[in-house]
Image (spheres, rainbow, N blue to C red):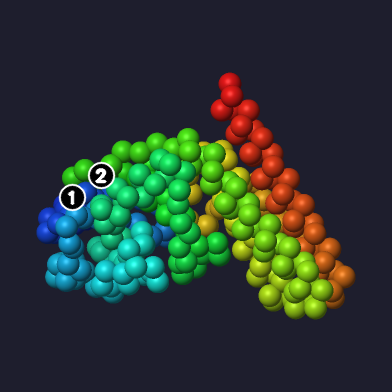
Amino acid sequence: MDDEAFVAYVGERLISLPAVQGVTLGGSRAEGTNRPDSDWDFSLYYRGGFEPATLRALGWPGEVTELGGWSAVTGGVFNGGAWLEVDGRRSDVHYRDLDVVDRVIAEASEGRFVIEPLWFHLAGIPSYLVLAELSTKRLLAGHVPEVTYPRALRERAPAVWRAQAEAELDYARRYHAAAGRLTQCLGLLARATACAAHAVLAARGRWVTNEKQLVARAGLGSVDRILGAATADPEVLRDVAERTHATCADAVRSAVTAGGQAEST
């Protein structure tokens, strides 16, 4: 079947599952930035208790986790899903609990969020990722909440991310760089850069759904060249850390200033 028939088919099957109220297509396929080999990312939004066994019973080959299977945080936003092959296409299905989504939307409207650890993500994910997904999704079946970028979140989130970035940049310079611990130093610098990128995009009111293009979208791609010059020599590592810090600090400062000016006009 062609792509349109495929997404319609998946939407129809997922919306038929008990407790599911909405089904969306997300990621690069929804945003139009996909490559020919990109996966298909679907989310099912349920309320009142979803049974993964009902998804497993559809018979699509792959792995279906129980609720909470993808997160170390009880009640977190990333609470499981499935890696499947549907009609020969690699397809991910994400579970989204609408009770959790409603709570996160309310918290974000007040500028509050938490950062959850998640596989493959340097900085973890902000709980407001679920708003980002809703904002960039393509609705396939049923209904899901409509959202906009909360003003309070745009005002408060950059400071949270900036504080995290500053702390890790300082630790990398003071301790790991000074001791020539190359792996630990670069690890912290990379994580700090991801945090700074989150700060930049939050100040701009731009949604983030994952870290794949996070650094580039924040204008921090030059950090790649800075980190590429690193060696285990403490003097070189301190220089790399200081240059990374200056680049991240400048980017965050500029984004926050521009965001404040935009709000005042």
Residue, x 74% and y 56% (percent of image)? 245
Horizontal relation, residue 194 to residue 8: left or right = right
Q: Where is residue 223 in the image (x, y as percent from the top left)?
A: 71, 56
Task: Tell me, yes or no, whether the two marked residues, 1 and 2, touch with CB atoms within 8 Å.
Answer: yes
Residue, x 85% and y 75% (percent of image)? 233
N-term mark: 1 or 2: 1
Mark 2 crowdedness (10 Å alpha carbons): few <14, some 14-19, many ≥20: some
**Amino acid at the residue labelled 2:** Val
Mark 1 crowdedness (10 Å alpha carbons): few <14, some 14-19, many ≥20: some
Camera-side residue of 106 and 92? 106
Q: In the current view of this chain or complex, which residue is farthest to the top?
A: 265
Horizontal relation, residue 216 to residue 66: left or right = right
Q: What element carries label 1?
A: strand
Residue, x 31% and y 60% (percent of image)? 94
**Amino acid at the residue labelled 1:** Gln
- Residue carrying label 2: 144
Camera-side residue of 197 and 227? 197
Q: Where is residue 43 in the image (x, y as percent from the top left)?
A: 29, 55
Horizontal relation, residue 105 to residue 246: left or right = left
Q: Position of residue 264 (x, y in %)?
A: 59, 24
Q: Position of residue 202 (x, y in %)?
A: 54, 44
Residue, x 42% and y 58% (percent of image)? 38
Camera-side residue of 113 and 172? 113
Q: Is residue 91 visible?
A: no
Position of 16 relative to 175 (above/below): above
- Residue carrying label 1: 21
Horizontal relation, residue 175 to residue 194: left or right = right
